[in-house]
Every structure is written in structure tokens, then in C-alpha cells.
Amino acid sequence: MSMDRLIEGIVKTQNPTVVGLDPKLSYIPEYLRQQAFAEHGETLEGAAAAFLAFNLGIIDAIYDVVPAVKPQAAYYEALGWPGVRALCETIAYARKKGMFVITDGKRNDIGSTMEAYAQAHLGTTVVAGSSYTPFGADCLTVNGYLGTDGITPLLPLCREGDKGIFVLVKTSNPSSGELQDKLIEGQPVYLHMGRNCERWGQEAMGKYGYSSVGAVVGATYPDQLMQLRKALPHTFFLVPGYGAQGGGARDVAGGFDERGLGAVINSSRGIICAWQKGGWKPEQYAQAAREEALRMQRDITSLLPKICL
Amino acid sequence: MSMDRLIEGIVKTQNPTVVGLDPKLSYIPEYLRQQAFAEHGETLEGAAAAFLAFNLGIIDAIYDVVPAVKPQAAYYEALGWPGVRALCETIAYARKKGMFVITDGKRNDIGSTMEAYAQAHLGTTVVAGSSYTPFGADCLTVNGYLGTDGITPLLPLCREGDKGIFVLVKTSNPSSGELQDKLIEGQPVYLHMGRNCERWGQEAMGKYGYSSVGAVVGATYPDQLMQLRKALPHTFFLVPGYGAQGGGARDVAGGFDERGLGAVINSSRGIICAWQKGGWKPEQYAQAAREEALRMQRDITSLLPKICL
């Protein structure tokens, strides 16, 4: 089961965090950009080559101390198809290094179309009898606004394909409450969506008590995070919003269970832009990311028990 | 204003429909697949070349009688980055032929990330001082589960960039009611989301009474379509679900205003797979699509007044 692999990575590294690979050109040291432009031109292809080189440096620097990466599809799409190719190559490299890869795409559609997204991001596509892996992530974030039949096509991959999903439940942004906090039959929308995750995950249970249908719950809403941890005992949480978005270790502590499991905390800019603060040379960007990842690990685990299965 | 251009195209062709370019290998005539495989291999690249050739044939056959196309991102992503390149090329070709292009991506995220999606699909990306257009559609479908700050980054493009969005309001799939029909403060979620569209669109009003912030409302829910038409006088509707999903002309009639405007009806499989029914040769696939598009036009406009501004 996919979520079991994430959990095993967290236990092995004693690090319940994920590094968001959300590159922008302005985050990338000048020397890397110039190398990429020299080889591929000052074009989308050149920019995509810079993204890839930047990501590979980060992955090389963290793969032994961080269990997972989460590339955000939007930043790659902003470079058109060359950016999307860099996303594919980033995923493949991170997996080769043994990292668990969560593609943050928040995909959603009606059933027949969702099958195509499942194939794209988690599955395989058959061309003239041969199977190809279009993106090949371990997990995909999805949006459940369309209801169960927009999620169903992903469940066979969660049950039998060693893949997982994280469904948006309570997002980290300031206006998430506009819909997600509203009450339906006396309970907030996010809780309904969370209970859906428990239901969708029933047949994709792993051996450590969590299913391969997880939920996205923002660090910026610590009360709801704690409430949801209690209400959804089998649902693993992907928690964005730590660091640049304002969440701290105390804010995320409520997302964990008594074993120190149940959540993986994401930081993107905090880690990948660490070199831009505090006296690092541009050439040390990857080392700066590693140091910040280790600082984040200490920060978060300081409030947790030793993480165990 | 983007929606004005769509409306002008509808009036010029007297055809309030959009053709969904949702290719699968099984929809593509054998001879086109074989040509593409011969040139690019039995690979994702070969399959993407077949998608592109297929789409170009359809566009050539319909561009003078249908105002818009709607490529569904999922089917292109199912071929990895070569598929995404075929999506780019399809968009560019349709626009060159004067068609209005709606990328159906149902994108959604927090504000800072949504800026990257806006740039990707509707805007431009600057690399070393030069501007590039990553995808370059006229419109993008988006999902509003995250609330206003997930939509805000798109609004400058709707106001000043001649671009538009369609926000998911009431989707066409069987389980859309699980969340969308539920009552919040006495009104269904879809109506709240629809009223958001009116609000988000206020500063992106076009000259024909509709803003560049539209809504997706499924043909499979004719009562809600009619209700929303009355409740949202400035919101243009993208209506999927006609044809293969079960909606007919009577089901979509309620989406139009008294000028025959206010909605554009999508059919995907019904048009692009028309050659597989009713005695067409594979080489006639594009002609079959044109005939079916014209039949659909007659079907839908038979219940409407002459469309006028």
C-alpha cells in the first residue's frame, strides 16, 4: 500500500515532512540559470532545464533525510510542455533516489475523465500493446467537489496499484472557509469531505492503520487539524502551510497520533529558497535546503514522541 | 473581453456549441494512428502525434461552423509531456483558425500557486526578459472549492487580458449532488458558487451583458440549469453533458436567455467519434464530425430564437 511506503519512509528518517518542489526562476541561483540558458536558450526549454537542474540538486541533498517530495504541477505548467517534461524527469529522479513522490495537481473531473488523470499521474497508458508511465508519481492530490464518482476511478490504483491520493479537505489559504467551513446538516463541509475520505479509503487500508486515501489539511487551521485527526482515524494528512504560509510546529502537532504518525508536513519555499537567507553562497543552495530541512525536522519532532510503527 | 469574443463567434456561426477535443487512441482511425506510429514510434510521442493529427483534421472540418473547441487536459496528460505538447499545438492551431479555445483543466489552488496556473494557461511567462505563451487558451475551467483567493489571481486576466474562466458550479456527473446540492443557510452549494461567479465577474463585464467569469452547469440537470439562468443574469454558462452523457436539446434550452445567448453547449465524444457510427469510412472522420456538429446545431437552435446581440 502506497501510504505504508510513505509511513515507512517517515519512520526510517524519523522525519514526518515533505519538501515542496515549487520552482520559480527567481528561486534558482544565477549560475544554474546561466548554465541552462547557455545550453537550451533563454526560452521555456532553457527555464525548464534550470528547474530540473535545481530540483536534482535539492533531491541529491535531502533524499537521505527527508522521505518525500511534492512537486506542484502549476509551476511546471507555467513553462508549458518543456516544464511538464521537467516535472516528469523530476518525479523519475526522486523515485530513483528512493523518495516518495506526491504530485500536487488537485485534479478533479467526472468519472470518465478522471480515469485519464489516474492513468496520467499514477498509472500507465497502453500504446499499441506496450505500457508507458506518463508521470509515475506515488500519490496525487485531488479535489472532491464533484463527489464520489470523480474519486472512484482512482480507488483501484489505491487498492491494488500501490498508489495513493490526498483529497482536499481543509485547505491552508485565507478564504478556504468560504465554502469549507460552512455548515451542512450541522457539520462543516470539511468534515463531510473528511468523512468521505474515511469511506473511500475503507478498501485501501494499509498495515499501519491508515488507508491510501489521505486528506489535505492546512497547518494554518490548527483547531480543525486537531478536530479532523480525532474524527478521521484512518486518514493520513498532508499538511501544507508550515513556514512561508505562517504555520509553526505547535500548529501542526495536533495532526499527529500518539505514535507520531498520521501526518506529513510540507514546506516549499522555506526549504528551496533557504539559500536566499542567512549568508549562503548561491552554490550552496542545496546544502542550505538540507540544513533547513533538518531544522524543520527538529522543530516538528521536538513536540512529538519517537516515531514508531 | 474574452466572453464577448465567444458570444460574437456564436452569433456569427449561429451556433451556441463547443466541440470537446477529448481524444483517446480508440477514437482515432487506424490509418492516422499508423501514420503517426510510423513517424514517431509506438510510443507516447507517437500517440501524441496521432492525437494532434486527429485534432487538426477535426478543427479544419468545423472551424467555419463551430465557434469554439474545448480540449480536456486529462486526455493529453495521459500521454505524459508529449501529450501536453500536443495540447499546446492543438490550442495554437485552433486559435490560428479563429476558434475560441477553452482549456478544460478544472485547475484550483491557493493564491500564489493559482498565479502560476493563470500564467500557464491564459497568460505569459517571462524568461530572461522575453515573454512566452505556455498554453495560450482563451478560457480555463477552474474549481472554486478553495474560495475567493484561489480565483483572484485569474481576475486581472479576465478584466484586462482578454481572457476568461468557467467556474464549476453544478457539474454533469451523477454524484455531483453529494456536495453541490447540499443546503448551506437554506440554499444549495451550487447556488452559492454561482453567486460567487456573479461577484467575481463584476469588474470583468463585457458589452453584451455577460462577464468573463462564467460557470459550468451540466445539461444533465435541466431544472438547476434553468434556476441558475434566472439567478445569475451576468454569468455565461458552459454546459457539458449533451449527447454521450445523456442530455438533449430540451435539457439545455433553459440555459439560454431570450436572445438565444447565455450558454454554450459542449459535445465531445458525440462529435469526435461520429465516424464510428452510421456508415462512415475512417478517412471521413472529420466530415462525420462536421455533419454531427451541424446536426447538433440544428437540434439545439430549433428550440431557440435567432441568436442576436
Image (cartoon, coloured by chain):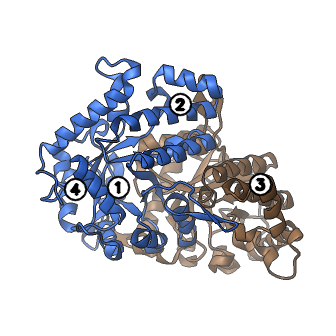
Chain colours: A blue, B brown
- In the rendered image, the quadrant that contains the N terminus of chain B is top right
Distance from label 4 to label 3 (Cα)? 48 Å
SS type, badge 4: helix
Distance from label 2 to label 3 (Cα)? 41 Å
Which mark, residue B194?
Answer: none
Which mark, residue A50?
Answer: 2
Residues at discs 4 and 2 both on one chain: yes
Subunit bearing disc 3? B
Point out the frontmost of discs 1 and 4.
4
Distance from label 1 to label 4 (Cα)? 17 Å
Q: Are marks 3 and 1 in contact (CB under 8 Å)?
A: no
- Residue located at (62% from left, 77% from top): B245
Q: Nearer the viewer, residue B68 or B125?
A: B125
Subunit bearing disc 4? A
Under mark 3, the amino acid is Gly
- Residue located at (24% from left, 50% from top): A12
Horizontally, residue B60 falls left or right of residue A232, namely: right
Point out the frontmost of discs 4 and 2.
2
Neighbour class for label 3 at 10 Å: few (<14), some, many (≥20)? Answer: many
Q: Nearer the viewer, residue A239 or B182?
A: A239
The quarter holding residue B42 reads bottom right
Which mark, residue A225?
Answer: 4
Q: Are marks 4 and 2 in contact (CB under 8 Å)?
A: no
Which mark, residue B9?
Answer: 3
- The residue to which callout 1 is attached is A178
- Residue located at (76% from left, 52% from top): B40
Neighbour class for label 4 at 10 Å: few (<14), some, many (≥20)? Answer: many
